[in-house]
Image: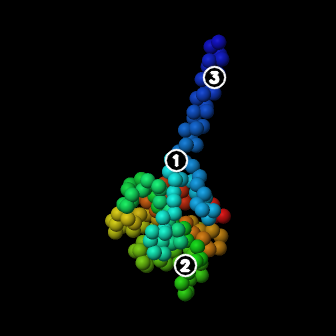
Amino acid sequence: MNKKVILILMIILALTSIMAVTSFKSNQDFDGLFTMDIPAGQHFTDVAYCLPNGALGCSREYLDDNTGCELEQDDIMIFYYNDSYLVEGESNAWQHAVNDLTTSYFYQVVQDDGNSLVLTNDLGMKVMPPYLVGVKNDDGSKAVFVGGHHLDDLKRYADSVEFK
């Protein structure tokens, strides 16, 4: 009997461990445009309709359903760019996003790895994330920027983006 109890306890412990590890993140599909790992228990909705041309010049802006008017320490914002907002002289969404974020919104490039980019804004505005981490698809026609306060977390989320 003791061996059976120990075996059952080991199975329960193994299942609990697996559930704990997988519950720290989940994957969300963003309107069929891309997927991304997000914090467990959160769901993001497109709220760009409430701002003219979206926030930060993007096509779509996603906020957690529980986010208020000000960006709190643990909140993240997700900005999607595609070629629909190009202006004269811009060749793709990636170039548009970088141009717009660094000129109109005063972000500065801190790290550029070719396919990913880290931007910072130290103006202290409560509605704008202090960090943005962006990734693009192969031809730059689509880009996603993840914004918030915790740079390492933002990099992890941005690295998980898969464009459709």
Q: Percent position (x, y) of residue 3? A: 65, 16
Q: Is residue 156 above or below residue 163?
A: above
Q: Is residue 1 left or right of residue 87?
A: right
Q: Which mark is residue 40?
A: 1
Residue 65: x %, y % from top left? 47, 55
Density class for disc 3 (Cα within 10 Å; few <14, some 14-19, many ≥20) is few
Q: Which mark is residue 5?
A: none
- The kind of residue tagged 3 is Ile
**Secondary structure of residue under mark 1:** loop
Which residue corresponds to mark 2?
85
* Residue sitting farthest toward the bottom: 88
Q: CA distance from mark 1 to mark 3?
A: 28 Å
What is the quadrant of the N terminus in the image? top right
Q: Of tags 3 and 2, which is closer to the observer? A: 2
Within 10 angstroms of label 1, few (less than 14), some, or many (20 or more) residues? Answer: few
| Amino acid at dot 2 | Tyr
